[in-house]
Amino acid sequence: MPTPDDYLVTLAELQSEFAAALRMADPDVPVPSCDDWSVGDLADHLAGVHHWAAAMARDEDEVPLPVPLDLVATYEAQAAELRETLANLGAEATGRILNGLSEDGRGPVEFWFRRQVHETLVHLWDIRSALGLEPPESTPELWADTVDEVLTVMYPRQIALKRTRKVVTRIELTATDTGQTWGIGAPNAVQKVAVSGAARDLALLLWGRLTPRAEGLTVTGDARALDDALTRAIVP
């Protein structure tokens, strides 16, 4: 797993790429992967998430942002706030994290180094996809870490907060480019399904950006049970 310093470097790179895409975009362009959002809505969301996460890391209540007059400037300001907050606090500081039990549970700020990288990575894919650009040139290992975060952090938290029910189908995912395998559901479940593909495609599948029938994904076993599992709120 990357170190906090690695995550901080990656976060800066992803934020810079997001800002670059935002500069060339019409704010009214639809973002199909985000329901009825526009590029402007997506930028406003990610800027707000960075601002909120920085406050959480500082163990403070978030101060709401004003309506942005300049989407790019607002995004870059909140991106910088997040990076500076994490760098100044350090990974071992204690702040509010998403610990699976409550919205304001406390724990190591290291949580936000990883969480905000993956938040930014997925939304960078969203904006680049909306603009007809190539996907982010991120490593398979980073996308595999996105998969791991969903299955070991986000999904268990959704269950703990009673936002979803446990998946009963045994689902095994294999990243063909990194060789990693993950599984959720009871190992001895009657319904079983395996999904293989590039780590990026597995991550996008779990985050609802791709369907199991997307090119590059191979599904073996009970495809209908997989569809049912993916309709559950395994991510926020």
Image (spheres, rainbow, N blue to C red):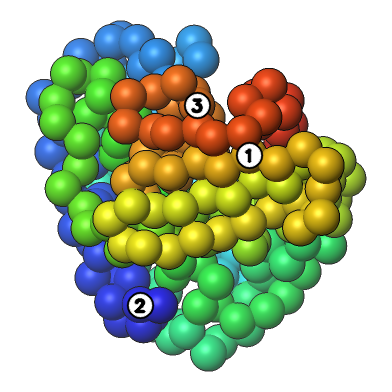
Q: Amino acid at mark 2?
A: Pro
Up the image or down, 154 lies above or below 122; here it is below
* Dot 1 or dot 3, earlier in sequence: 1
Figure quadrant of the C terminus: top right
Give the image location of residue 32, x and y in percent. 40, 14
Q: Amino acid at mark 3?
A: Pro
Which residue lies under the disc numbered 3?
A: 212
Which residue lies under the disc numbered 1?
A: 193
Res. 12 visible in picture = yes
Which residue lies under the disc numbered 2?
A: 2
Q: CA distance from mark 1 to mark 3?
A: 11 Å
With 181 as the anchor, is 77 left or right in this view?
Answer: left
Q: CA distance from mark 1 to mark 2?
A: 30 Å
Which residue is found at the position 13% from the left and 38% from the top? 20
Q: Between label 1 and label 2, give the one nearer the viewer.
A: 1
Which residue is found at the position 65% from the left and 67% from the top? 97
